[in-house]
Image (spheres, rainbow, N blue to C red):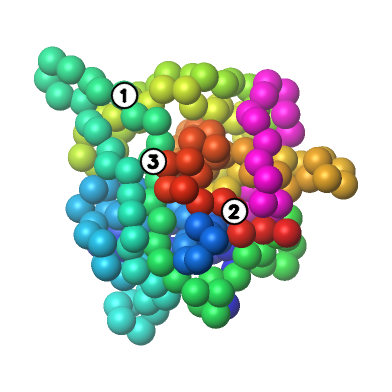
Amino acid sequence: PVPIGVSTGHPNVTAGTIGARATDGTNVFALSNNHILAAMNDGREGDVFLQPGMADGGRDPDDAIGTLYDFEPLRFCQLLSCPSNAIDAAIALTTPENVGNETPDGGYGTPRPWTHEPELGLEVQKYGRTTGLTVGRITGVNATIDVRYRNGMARFEDQVVISGNGFSAGGDSGSLVVTKGVLLGDRRPVGLLFAGSPTSTLANPIDVVLDRFGIMIDGS
């Protein structure tokens, strides 16, 4: 199985990150962003997802490791209105034989199945396709921010802001953000990374993502 935190994407997408393996108690899924697994609303249930993503040499069908299962549609700003979004997320059906539940060597390992509420000052970490393992700190919660996509501008509300130079870069979208602590306080999922700049990174609160799909992180 491929680890989490590595390159992935819909065949019509360059590349993002497999954030985590998740389950609804019966099925096993790969968790990432809509704009990574569902090609910014253009994907359809049953479309394959690749590992690695197209930008890293992945090709359909040789590198397909599962199929798109569900995604939350992104709502873009129009001339006179700007609807709000809560998450940029999608899940793809896969198997434990295709997707593992731990990061590559040198990462944080396996995330916990139980989550942690985002809070100011909380130290967090992520493992992503582009920048690997990085550490940052939550400096904003309940944030409202406009994010520019290829299809236009989208407004997000109640988001998590993480600060730390180099915490993320293009291609890290979809990474799972987890706590960095000791013992049971370590590796607890906090957010799903979906956008960023050189100094700040944005993440959807993970509980909102998991509730939307009726899943939990398949961790230890």
Q: Main secondary structure of the magenta part?
A: loop
Picture quarter with the N terminus: bottom right
Residue at position x 66%, y 41% in the image: 115
- Circle 3 packing at 10 Å, graded few (<14), some (14-19), many (20+), is many
- Asked if residue 7 is among those painted magenta in the image, a careful observer would answer no
Q: Which residue is mark 2?
A: 217
Q: Residues within 10 Å of mark 2 (few under 14, many from 20)?
A: many
Which is more toward the observer, 27 or 138? 27
Q: Is residue 142 visible in the rendered structure shown here? A: yes
User: What residue did someone put label 3 on?
Assistant: 88
Queried whether the magenta region covers residue 126, the answer comes back as yes
> Where are the magenta residues, as a range?
111-127
In the displayed image of the protein, which residue is found farthest to the top? 80
Q: Report the residue at 33% width, 77% height from top.
A: 59
Instruction: Identify which amino acid the numbered label 1 is placed on.
Output: Ser
Is residue 178 something that shows in the picture?
Answer: no
Q: Is residue 25 left or right of residue 119?
A: left
* Circle number at residue 84: 1
- Where's residue 158, x and y in %? 47, 23
Callout 2: SS: strand
Tell me whether the residue at label 3 lies in contact with that at label 2, contact meaning CB atoms closer than 8 angstroms.
no
- Measured in 3D between alpha carbons, the distance from the residue under mark 1 to the one under mark 2, in whole angstroms, is 26 Å
Left or right relative to 167: residue 83? left
Nearer the N terminus, badge 3 or badge 2? 3
- In this rendering, which labeled residue sits more in front, label 3 or label 2? 2
